[in-house]
Image: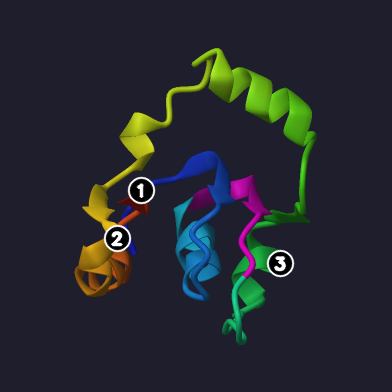
Amino acid sequence: MPSLAFDVVVDVSGRAEGLTLALGLVRPRGTVVLKSTFHGTTPLEAWPIVVDEVTLVGSRCGPFTAALDLLTRTVVQTAPLVAAEYPLNAHRAAFEAAKTRLKVLFRM
């Protein structure tokens, strides 16, 4: 695990191992927000949550209208979140890259 400690860590990875990474990045008495959904299970070692008094918050969906408005007005910059873009006919390469990158998009 990286030796970083953040007050709040938000897992939006969509991967089972995202929660483990988030818990490794949060400081004692910090908060982890679990926004990801994924198929399958994730291993959870609970003792660090208890010992470090970490708050774990589940979050489903927010106000889409407000979020879309912010995106439309470019108030929120999304470009730094995108690791790579692929044309649709390069789908195999895109899915392979998505295994190790933050976010991969298809150009349509």
- The earlier-in-sequence mark between 1 and 2 is 2
Q: Position of residue 3 (x, y in %)?
A: 33, 53
Helix, strand or loop at label 1? It is loop
Tell me the kind of residue under disc 2: Leu
Residue 108 at x, y = what percent? 36, 48
Instruction: Give the magenta range.
Output: 26-37
Left or right of residue 2, residue 36 in this image: right
Please state which amino acid type lies under the numbered disc 1.
Met
In space, the residues marked 2 and 3 are separated at their CA atoms by 45 Å
Q: Determine whether label 1 and label 2 are within 8 Å by CB.
A: yes
Please tell me which residue is depicted at 32% across the width and 33% down the height of the picture. Answer: 80
Q: How far across and down, in percent of the image, does residue 26 sit? A: 52, 50
Q: Is most of the magenta stretch helix, strand or loop? A: strand
How crowded is the residue under tag 1: few (<14 C-alpha within 10 Å), some, or many (20+)?
few
Where residue 55 appears, x then y in whole percent? 73, 53
Q: Residue at x 65, y 28 (%)?
A: 68
Q: Which residue is mark 2?
A: 88
- Find the distance from the CA under tag 1 to the CA under tag 3: 46 Å
Q: CA distance from mark 1 to mark 2?
A: 7 Å
Of the pair 76 and 17, the residue shown nearer to us: 76
Crowd tier of the residue under label 2, counting other residues whose Cα lies within 10 Å: few below 14, some 14–19, many 20 or above: few
For residue 41, which quarter of the picture?
Answer: bottom right
The mark nearer the N terminus, 1 or 3, is: 3
Query: In the image, is 53 to the left or to the right of 86?
Result: right
Please report the residue visible at 37 percent of the width from the left and 47 percent of the height from the top.
4
Give yes or no for residue 33 being in the magenta stretch.
Answer: yes
What residue would you read off at disc 1?
Answer: 108
Does the magenta run of residues contain 86? no
Q: Which residue is mark 3?
A: 50
- Between label 1 and label 3, give the one nearer the viewer: 1
